Amino acid sequence: MAYETLKLEERDAIAVVTVNRPDKFNALNTQVIAELADCFTTLRSNAAIRAVILTGAGEMAFIAGADISVLAELDPQEARENAMRGQRLTELIENLGKPVIAAVNGFALGGGCELAMACTLRIASENAKFGQPEVKLGIIPGYGGSQRLPRLVGKGRALELILTGEHIDAQEAWRIGLVNRVVKRDQLLAEAESVARKILAVAPVAVRYSIEAVNGGLETPLTEGLALEANLFGMCFTTRDMKEGTGAFLEKRPPKFTGK
Ligand code: COA
């Protein structure tokens, strides 16, 4: 599929997906959501791609939220369907089976903050701003914000952000654990790529199972999460990469992982 609202670039095993509506601060209209869903579905089954970076075009915004001109026209049933489409996209990103790094280069508001939260890791540039300003429009977060924000930063901080609709800057987002690190604007993509390359150097199946254990465990009581971890731990021992990783350590040489 040729994309009109996205740029897709491949750098070895890393795909860089850029939402490309800079004149509208990369706001998520129906076409952007559909193209992102198609793009991530394709990337999920592309074995040559082992990590993804998600960012926004231009200097102002990562994604400034759902397109308010679209929201303004929805009836209640369409609004519910719109939320479910956005939520499906967040679940696709969260469970892609490979790391997705949000490189947040400006405003990450509403659906933009929600897409960033669905990513595996978040790196922000110093000018980034985060927020869930939906209440200022008379609505609530619809793409998972009311669920993922408290899981990431705790209930009290999440409710403060959601109820005031205020923006926070990158340093505050880092302080409360919403982003993993903050870097200078001109280093953002290089830093995201450097983190991706560190993950590319380790065993791919172990990466996939680690994400699955953390995501799955957060949805279950501790005992079930521990059972999930033990099962996935056992499955690692069916891989050649487990033999290679442990063998290489014992032989004091660097491992050569194949993803098998
Ligand atoms: N939906 C649709 N258009 C949006 C948008 C959104 N979420 N966010 C920004 N835009 C558009 C603006 O309408 C404007 O387009 P125009 O030049 O054709 O009028 C352009 O992007 C630039 O935005 P503008 O408001 O002029 O820039 P600013 O620097 O004064 O403010 C923001 C930037 C991000 C603070 C402000 O645009 C904003 O609050 N956006 C909405 C954020 C939001 O509520 N998101 C959650 C939606 S559920």
Image (cartoon, rainbow, N blue to C red):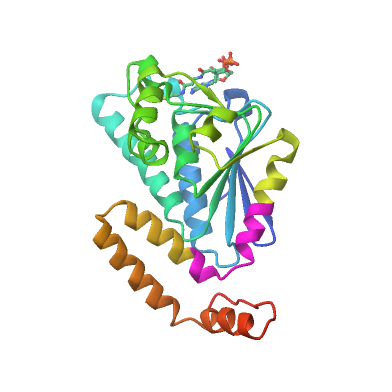
Can you say whether 231 is above or below 90 in the image? below
Residue 246 placement, left or right of 76:
right
Q: Position of residue 247 (x, y in %)?
A: 59, 85
Region of the chain picked out in magenta, as a range: 194-207
25 over 88 or under it: above or below = above
In percent of width and height, residue 86 lies at 39, 39
As for residue 244 lying within the magenta part, the answer is no
Residue occupying image coordinates x 33% and y 35%: 83
User: Foreground residue, 17 or 103?
Assistant: 103
Residue 107 in view in this figure: no
Residue 100 in the figure: left or right of residue 16: left
Q: Is 51 left, or right, of 90 in this rendering?
A: right
Instruction: Please give the name of the residue rendered at 42% of the width and 36% of the height, measured from the top-left corner.
Output: 153
Residue shown at 51% from the left, 57% from the top: 42
Q: Residue at x 33, y 72 (%)?
A: 231
Viewer-proximal residue, 198 or 51? Answer: 198
Residue 179 in percent (x, y) is at 54, 39
Pick whichever, 59 or 177, lies toward us: 177
